[in-house]
Structures are given as structure tokens and as C-alpha cells.
């Protein structure tokens, strides 16, 4: 998938287990360095990228200078955490040490890459968080980049999940470029159904024994797969549809589950027709394993996940789905290639 003969180099900031980097590799980037402070995530990252042996920068990005990468890497990619609401909104957001956006901007300033791609939650574009997005875009423009942002739907790129992600793309001498959906309406391929990846009867990997129980006061929606018919944040997965967005807090009752006894639509119909809520455990329900969550995010099935199980689920829930990452980075690579061609002409 490399565009032309160029292979651009990249540094991944807030690299996690490396969903974004895996996608970047598929889009033709050579990830030469990754910065991350979680040792488990970095160990998983190292295993996934053993072939290119990127430099692993373990530690707090807020305390690290990136000056030495100036002129050494072509693009900066990364998914900084953003907690703009944590202690009273924007003012605390930009000074909150858990907010990685200021460090990402500083790294771009120090490295001055040809282009950058920053990934974040779609919520950054709405409500009071919008100010953080606008300030980020303005800061990047001050640095001389042409900047655009877009929310992309993972399902439009072949990921069987409802996940959406916001991407900010900046190009130094050229224009941002965005990928066209490959799946769903207006394309040749339908969205990928969860059933094509997951088998409710036969788990892949160690079973997750966290139980699923009926909610005492169900919240009914038109679809059996929405609303709140069961306890916990982990929703049932519609085998014919998309899995819910996988959260970093999966592991316990926030882990989505499979309905092996196929009772969810019938139970929903029972409630809609005025039936009484059930109680106790849901027969045949089983929560997805680490390996199944990883499959939904597009990680190779043989991936070795480091750390305790909660850490493994967190690394997966934090990741950019690989196919979405590949599509978004492909856009960036196209933007940089066009920029290079016009400089050469
Ligand atoms: C949203 S996740 C990134 C996921 C990654 N892009 C992927 O696709 O797999 C954010 C990551 O930033 C890391 N992180 C947060 N604050 C950090 C800091 N100050 N220094 C280094 N890493 C940090 C977290 O441990 C987490 O793995």
C-alpha cells in the first residue's frame, strides 16, 4: 500500500499497544519511534512491531523533548488522552497533566514534520470541549500547517464496531487528504457483521466469567440491541450488526457480550408487549474475551497481550481500530506525497 516508492518515517506519540501504528504500517509508513508511559502497552507494542524494531521511548511525554527528531521523521501521529472536563472544564483541561494535547502540539513544534495526524474522541468537536479542538487547530495553524478535522466511522472502513473517531490532520506545504469509505452505503461492500468475526458458542482465548444479569428496571428502545435491558455497561452484540464501541474500561461488566441462546430479540419483544422484567443471570450470555475484543479492533489473532487482564482489555479499548487507522494514515500519506511531487515539479 506504499504510495509511489516513498516510505515516510513516523513517530507515534501516546502509542498504546499500537493500533494506530499497525494501521500506519499498512498505509506505508515506517514507524521509527513510539512514546508511551504504560509498560504493558509498550511491551505489547514492541511485540507487534518486532520486525521494524522502532525506538521505544518509555516515560512521560510531558517531560520529554522531541528536538532530536527534527529532520529525522517525516510525520507525527498519535492519540493523546484528553480530559477537558475532569476538573471543571477547559481552564483545567489545558493545564491538567493528563491532557496530552499540549504535549502533542509541542512535539509537532519541535519536530516540524511534513504532516501530522492526531486522533481523539468525537466529543472533542461538540459542547464545551469544542474550545479545546478549536484552540488545538489554531495552535497548529500558527505553526504553519494547513489543518482540517473530521470524524470517521470505523464501520465505513470494514471494522465491525460502532466506534467513531475524530482525526485532526495538518500538512505543512499542501492540503489534507481524507479517505473515502470502503464499506456501507454508496460502496460495493456492506458493513461487516459481528457474526463474521465472533462465534457465540466457541470463545477464542480464556473465557471471561463476569456474569450478565437482567436489569430490574429495563430501559426499552426500538432496537433490542440498544437501551438497557441488562445490567452493566457491556451491551449485547447484535450478530447481524456492529458491535458496540469497545471501551478502555472493559474487563468486568463493561465488556460487551454474545447471546448464545439467542434470547435478546425475544426478551425485547416480551417487554415491548408489556411483559414483566426477568431477574437473575441471562442464560447463554458470555462476555467477549481479550482475543475477541482484539479481533473486533483488527489486531492479529496471534498478538501477545502483556499485563493483567484489565490492562490487556484497556490497551485494546484504547486503540484505534487497525483498518480505520490504515485508512486515515493513507489519507495523510497521499497528502504528503502530493506535497512532495509538487515540490519536485
Ligand atoms: C488513546 S491511548 C492511544 C492508543 C493508540 N494510539 C492505539 O491506537 O493503540 C492513549 C495512550 O497514551 C498513554 N499516555 C497517557 N498519558 C501519557 C503521558 N503523559 N506520557 C506517555 N504516555 C501517555 C496511555 O497510557 C495510553 O496508552
Image (tube, rainbow, N blue to C red):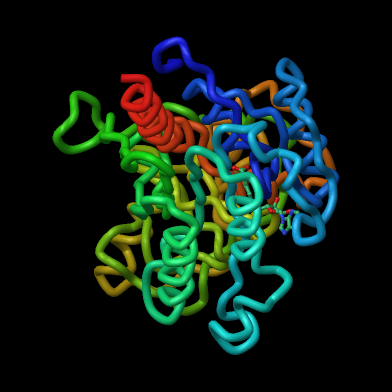
Q: From where the camera sits, is residue 8 visible?
A: yes
- Which quarter of the image is occupied by the N terminus? top left
In this view, the residue farthest toward the top is 5
- Which residue is located at x 50 percent, y 65 percent? 230
Q: In this rendering, would 306 be left or right of 181?
A: right
Q: Residue furthest bottom?
A: 88
Name the foreground residue: 238 vs 135: 135
- Looking at the image, residue 120 sits to the left or right of residue 202; the answer is left
Place of residue 124 in the rendered image (x, y in percent of width and height, measured from the top left): 45, 67
The answer to whether 300 is drawn above or below residue 276 in the figure is above
> Dividing the picture into quarters, in which one does residue 337 lie?
top left
Q: Position of residue 52 (x, y in %)?
A: 71, 19
Q: Left of 335 or right of it: where is 280?
A: right
Residue situated in front as seen by the camera: 305 or 126: 126
Q: Position of residue 159 (x, y in %)?
A: 41, 36
Quarter placement of the C terminus = top left
Q: Quadrant of residue 40?
A: top right
Amino acid at each position: 500500500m506504499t504510495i509511489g516508492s516513498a516510505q515516510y518515517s513516523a513517530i507515534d506519540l501516546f502509542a498504546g499497544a499500537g493500533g494506530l501504528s499497525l494501521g500506519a504500517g499498512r498505509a506505508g509508513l515506517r514507524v521509527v519511534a513510539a512514546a508511551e508511559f504504560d509498560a504493558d502497552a509498550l511491551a505489547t507494542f514492541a511485540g507487534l512491531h518486532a520486525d521494524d524494531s522502532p525506538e521505544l521511548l518509555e516515560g512521560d511525554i510531558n517531560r520529554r523533548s522531541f528536538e532530536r527528531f527534527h529532520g529525522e521523521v517525516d510525520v507525527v501521529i498519535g492519540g493523546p488522552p484528553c480530559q477537558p472536563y475532569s476538573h471543571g472544564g477547559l481552564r483545567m483541561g489545558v493545564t491538567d497533566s493528563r491532557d496530552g494535547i499540549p504535549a502533542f502540539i509541542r512535539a509537532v513544534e519541535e519536530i516540524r514534520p511534513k504532516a501530522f495526524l492526531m486522533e481523539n474522541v468525537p466529543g472533542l468537536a461538540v459542547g464545551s470541549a469544542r474550545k479545546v479542538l478549536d484552540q488545538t487547530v489554531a495552535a497548529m495553524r500558527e505553526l504553519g500547517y494547513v489543518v482540517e478535522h473530521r470524524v470517521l466511522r470505523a464501520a465505513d472502513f470494514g471494522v465491525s464496531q460502532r466506534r467513531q473517531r475524530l482525526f485532526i490532520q495538518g500538512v505543512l506545504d499542501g492540503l489534507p487528504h481524507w479517505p473515502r469509505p470502503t464499506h456501507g452505503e454508496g460502496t460495493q461492500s456492506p458493513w461487516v457483521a459481528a457474526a463474521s468475526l465472533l462465534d457465540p458458542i466457541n470463545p477464542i482465548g480464556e473465557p471471561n466469567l463476569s456474569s450478565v444479569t437482567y436489569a430490574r428496571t429495563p430501559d426499552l428502545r426500538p432496537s433490542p440491541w440498544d437501551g438497557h435491558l441488562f445490567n452493566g455497561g457491556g451491551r449485547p452484540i447484535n450478530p447481524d450488526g456492529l458491535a458496540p464501541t469497545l471501551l478502555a474500561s472493559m474487563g468486568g461488566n463493561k465488556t460487551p457480550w454474545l447471546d448464545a441462546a439467542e434470547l435478546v430479540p425475544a426478551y425485547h419483544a416480551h417487554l415491548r408487549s408489556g411483559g414483566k422484567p426477568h431477574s437473575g443471570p441471562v442464560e447463554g450470555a458470555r462476555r467477549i474475551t481479550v482475543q475477541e475484543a482484539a479481533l473486533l479492533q483488527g489486531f492479529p489473532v496471534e498478538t501477545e497481550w502483556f499485563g493483567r487482564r484489565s490492562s490487556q482489555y484497556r490497551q485494546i479499548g484504547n486503540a484505534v481500530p487497525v483498518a480505520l487507522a490504515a485508512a486515515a494514515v493513507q489519507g495523510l500519506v497521499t497528502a504528503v506525497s502530493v506535497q512532495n511531487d509538487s515540490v519536485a515539479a
